[in-house]
Amino acid sequence: MFHLQGREIRRVGGKLTLADGTLAGSNLTMDAAVRYCVTKLRIDVARALRMASLAPAMFLKLDGELGRIAPGFRANLVHLDDNLAVKQSWIEGT
């Protein structure tokens, strides 16, 4: 359980609910979403990673600074193991 904007949020299975049971969101992590795309939907790893990085950056109109590894882009990186689980992350290069 945690509080968000003055509301009590509970983790129930893979979802988040308010105290009265109303759905409050998902508890799905991005690495779990990528893993699901690759293992269950049979999307290739490169495409699944683009879906988790470049696609959201484009949607938010931040694709000029986020979503790819290139000069001038923010150095937000994640090291995934062979099972696509997070081993380490770097935010702004640190």
Image (cartoon, rainbow, N blue to C red):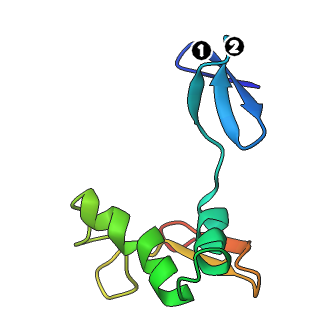
Query: What SS does tag 2 mark?
Result: loop
Q: Amino acid at mark 1?
A: Arg
Vertical placement of residue 53 versus 9, above or below: below
Instruction: Give the residue displayed 57% in from the left and 13% down from the top.
Output: 6
Q: Is residue 74 visible?
A: no
Q: Which mark is residue 19?
A: 2
- Residue 56 lies, in percent from the top left, at 36, 63
Quarter in which the N terminus is drawn: top right
In the rendered view, does 55 fall on the left or right side of 40?
left
Q: Nearer the viewer, residue 6 or 41?
A: 41
Instruction: Give the residue displayed 33% in from the left and 77% down from the top.
Output: 73
Quarter in which the C terminus is drawn: bottom right
Q: Is residue 76 visible?
A: yes
Between the residue at mark 2 and the residue at mark 1, the CA separation in whole angstroms equals 8 Å
Q: Nearer the viewer, mark 2 or mark 1?
A: 2
- Residue 91 lies, in percent from the top left, at 53, 66
According to the image, label 1 marks what residue? 7
In the rendered view, does 54 fall on the left or right side of 11?
left
Vertical placement of residue 1 versus 63, above or below: above
Vertical placement of residue 82 versus 91, above or below: below
Dot 1: within a 10 Å radius of its alpha carbon, few (fewer than 14), some, or many (20 or more) residues? few
In the rendered view, does 91 fall on the left or right side of 39?
left
Q: Are marks 2 and 1 in contact (CB under 8 Å)?
A: yes
Q: Amino acid at mark 2?
A: Ala
Dot 2: within a 10 Å radius of its alpha carbon, few (fewer than 14), some, or many (20 or more) residues? few
| Quarter location, residue 64 | bottom left
Count of labels in the image:
2
- Residue 51 lies, in percent from the top left, at 43, 72
Instruction: Give the residue displayed 47% in from the left and 69% down from the top.
Output: 52
Query: What SS does tag 1 mark?
Result: strand
